Image: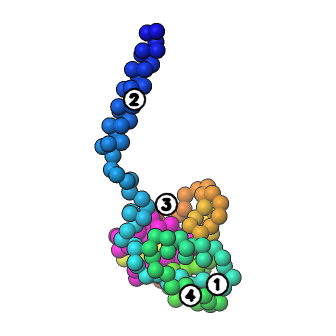
Amino acid sequence: MKNSKKIFLSIIIIGVVVLGLAWMSPASPPTLKDAWAHLDGLEAQVYKSPNCGCCDNYIGYLKRYGIEVERIVTDEMDEIKDKYGVPYDHSSCHTMTIGGYVVEGHMPLEAVSKLLKEKPSIMGIGLQGMPSGSPGMPGVKNSDFAVYSILEGGEIGSYLNL
């Protein structure tokens, strides 16, 4: 009988603690959309090949967070990458311009947000290849994304690991 009273009392105490925590927490936790609200309404241009479907998935990802995207389909992707200083050996399937910067590849919005908030003196950022689990790509992320910076003259540097 004593054990059942202890169990009952423990359940009551746990319930009071849980209710107290729920009462003190904000009405709704911040969402990724809230964290990237400063991107809402920004305009971006995404240059893509006519044969690439994952680029359309990436465009959908951007639109879900309020970015207005102009989709530019072209067979001249090498010329686009040259125009924006993206090194060939660090390229991906699509190239985006946003906020005065170039963004190469399936870039997570965490990196785009950081770029646009900090406004570093670089041409842009890139994510080489088409990594599994990156925005617009199927699969599971199995390693950090090495985001590089694009500097004047086609030089690259380290920017961020996500």
Q: Nearer the viewer, residue 60 or 148?
A: 60
Q: Does the magenta stretch include residue 127?
A: no
The quarter holding residue 92 reads bottom right
Residue 60 percent location from the top left of the image = 55, 73
Who's the residue at 46% across and 14% down the image? 4
Q: Can residue 159 be seen in this view?
A: no
Magenta residues span: 97-120
What residue did someone put label 2 on?
A: 14
Q: Which of the two discs, 2 and 3, labels the residue nearer the N terminus?
A: 2
- The question of residue 112 being in magenta is answered with yes
Mark 1 residue crowding within 10 angstroms, few (<14) / some (14–19) / many (20+): some
Q: Which amino acid does label 1 sit on?
A: Ser
For label 3, the residue is 161
Mark 1 to mark 4 CA distance (whole Å) = 9 Å
Say which residue appears at 60% left-offset and 73% top-offset.
57
| Residue 135 image-quadrant placement | bottom right
Of circles 2 and 3, the one toward us is 2
Residue occupied by mark 1: 49
- Which is nearer the N-term, disc 3 or disc 4? 4
Structural distance between the alpha carbons of marks 1 and 3: 27 Å
Q: How crowded is mark 4: few (under 14 residues within 10 Å), some or many (20 or more)?
A: some
Q: Which of the labelled discs sits on residue 72, or is there none?
A: 4
- On the image, the x and y values in percent for residue 115 come to 40, 71
Amino acid type, label 3: Asn
Residue type at mark 2 is: Ile
**Position of residue 38 measured from the top left corner of the image (x, y, whole percent):** 36, 71
Q: In this view, does 105 lie above or below 144?
A: below
Depth order, front residue of 10/157? 10
Q: Which of marks 4 and 2 is nearer the N terminus?
A: 2
Q: Distance between the residues labelled 4 and 2?
A: 57 Å
